């Protein structure tokens, strides 16, 4: 027979009547109703020879189910398993009668396999619940850590969110998912870090140890977030639209239809980042040359933004001096600035034109067109229909040709040669 504690958790009103625990008497609670039951076990506690006695109300409810209850009593491995299945029979009976008005209870036939499946699932859920010591330990650990650091706890005491501030006053959150064998098993942690958070854990560890390691990791990433915050505050960041603490990439506006994409290393945030210029060749080429020539001027003592200014010999437009719409020109094909999560990143090289386009609109015309053609016409907006016509027009240009992942064609606006290259990693 399963542990007595498990039976108490499942049926707290069903109590043993002798020291041998062969006679149980009490009540079973189902759907806010209490039913009197009495279970008599033989001395060897074998359920095959056990007897179940019920009140007359419960006998009426079980009319038509007696053979199922008797069968499950004889086949259950322990008393806890039987009580789970017994309560399941009662709950299903109540539910069906409430769902289908007028249905008689003896018209409902529950298959043996169905009951077994439900009972096994309920038994697994019961066994997965942690013991009472788990909750007592957890409350004590939170009191030791401080309730002011607790941001959230779910009703099952399995998911906990702790908050902390770094030295710059930025608030961060760590989500801790506890397991039923905690603290024997280490918890899973989710953070807003740009690098993996590796938790060091022993059997003596606690939430306080997790929080301490969390604070230490925050300090190690302070310089990285300082660098990224300066870029966000003093420049116009085109992508991502709403960068989070995990994001290491920024696409910074330089001028109209010209930008630089930087990928900062969180572990070495003041070193030269990976840079990629976006824009027309006649504008981007001089910037690339300056970066190559002045690379030796890069100073690890300065921030990324200040180094970029010194190396490229430019001043980035900032929210204090420029409006964002100055750098938000729409794509010349779809007439939209933002296409899904991307913005125009291809520009006509002709200085007199300089029309921007989405890379997808220039290169993946066939893919986008196939998606459009599958869409019902009634679901298309007028703007989307116009986009559809433009995409079909571009694909139908007789002068366009493709070589591997490069497509050669003409600018839809000035008819000058234009090239689009699709790379595995967008920069």
Image (spheres, rainbow, N blue to C red):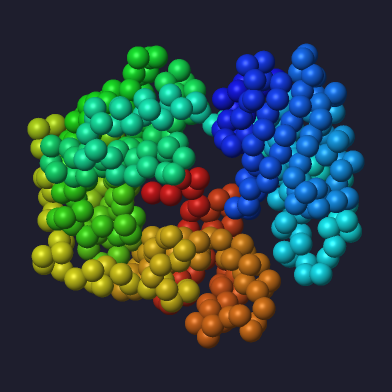
Q: Nearer the viewer, residue 247 or 89?
A: 89
Residue 370 on image: x %, y %: 66, 67
Q: Quadrant of the N terminus?
A: top right
From the top left corner, tell me how far across and down residue 367 is, in percent: 61, 62
- Viewer-proximal residue among 254 and 370: 370
- Is 422 situated left or right of 69 in this image? left
Residue depicted at x 42% and y 73%: 336
Q: Nearer the viewer, residue 420 or 328?
A: 328
Left or right? Give the position of 124 relative to 156. right
Quadrant for residue 296, please give it. top left
Judge left or right: residue 336 versus residue 223.
Answer: right
| 95 is higher (above) or lower (below) than 47 | below
Q: Is residue 275 at least partly visible in the picture?
A: no
Which of the 4 image quarters holds residue 141?
Answer: top left
Quarter of the figure with residue 86: top right
Residue at 71% over, 21% down: 22
- Please provide percent x and percent y for residue 358: 44, 64
Which residue lies at the image location 77% right of the left edge and 23% below the top edge?
41
Q: Position of residue 174 (x, y in %)?
A: 33, 38
């Amino acid at each position: 027979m399963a542990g007595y504690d498990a039976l108490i958790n499942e049926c707290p009103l069903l109590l043993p009547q002798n020291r041998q625990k062969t006679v149980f008497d009490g009540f079973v609670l189902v759907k806010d109703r209490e039913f009197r039951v009495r279970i008599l076990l033989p001395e060897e506690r074998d359920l095959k020879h056990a007897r179940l006695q019920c009140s007359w109300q419960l006998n009426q409810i079980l009319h038509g189910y007696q053979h199922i209850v008797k069968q499950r009593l004889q086949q259950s491995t322990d008393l806890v398993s039987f009580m789970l299945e017994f309560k399941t029979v009662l709950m299903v009976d109540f539910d069906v009668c409430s769902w289908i008005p007028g249905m008689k209870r003896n018209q409902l036939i529950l298959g043996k396999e169905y009951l077994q499946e439900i009972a096994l699932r309920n038994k697994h859920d019961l066994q997965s619940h942690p013991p009472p010591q788990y909750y007592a330990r957890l409350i004590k650990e939170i009191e030791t850590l401080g309730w002011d650091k607790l941001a959230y706890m779910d009703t099952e005491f399995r998911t906990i969110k702790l908050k902390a501030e770094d030295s710059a006053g930025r608030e961060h959150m760590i989500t801790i998912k506890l397991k039923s064998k905690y603290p024997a098993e280490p918890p899973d942690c989710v953070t807003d870090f740009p690098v993996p958070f590796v938790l060091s854990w022993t059997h003596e560890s606690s939430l306080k140890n997790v929080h301490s390691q969390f604070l230490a990791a925050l300090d190690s990433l302070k310089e990285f977030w300082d660098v990224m915050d300066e870029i966000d505050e003093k420049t116009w960041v085109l992508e991502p639209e709403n960068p989070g603490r995990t994001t290491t990439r920024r696409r910074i506006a330089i001028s109209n239809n010209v930008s630089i994409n930087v990928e900062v290393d969180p572990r070495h945030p003041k070193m030269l980042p990976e840079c990629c210029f976006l824009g027309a060749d006649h504008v981007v080429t001089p910037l690339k040359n300056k970066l190559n020539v002045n690379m030796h001027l890069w100073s690890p003592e300065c921030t990324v933004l200040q180094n970029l200014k010194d190396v490229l010999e430019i001043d980035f437009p900032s929210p204090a001096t420029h409006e964002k719409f100055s750098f938000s020109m729409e794509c010349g094909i779809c007439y939209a600035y933002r296409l899904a999560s991307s913005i125009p990143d291809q520009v006509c090289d002709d200085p007199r034109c300089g029309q921007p386009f989405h890379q997808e609109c220039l290169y993946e015309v066939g893919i986008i067109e196939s998606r459009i053609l599958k869409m019902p016409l009634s679901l298309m907006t007028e703007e989307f229909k116009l986009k559809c016509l433009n995409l079909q027009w571009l694909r139908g240009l007789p002068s366009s040709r493709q070589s591997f992942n490069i497509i050669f064609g003409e600018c839809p606006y000035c008819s000058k040669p234009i090239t689009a290259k699709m790379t595995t990693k967008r920069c």
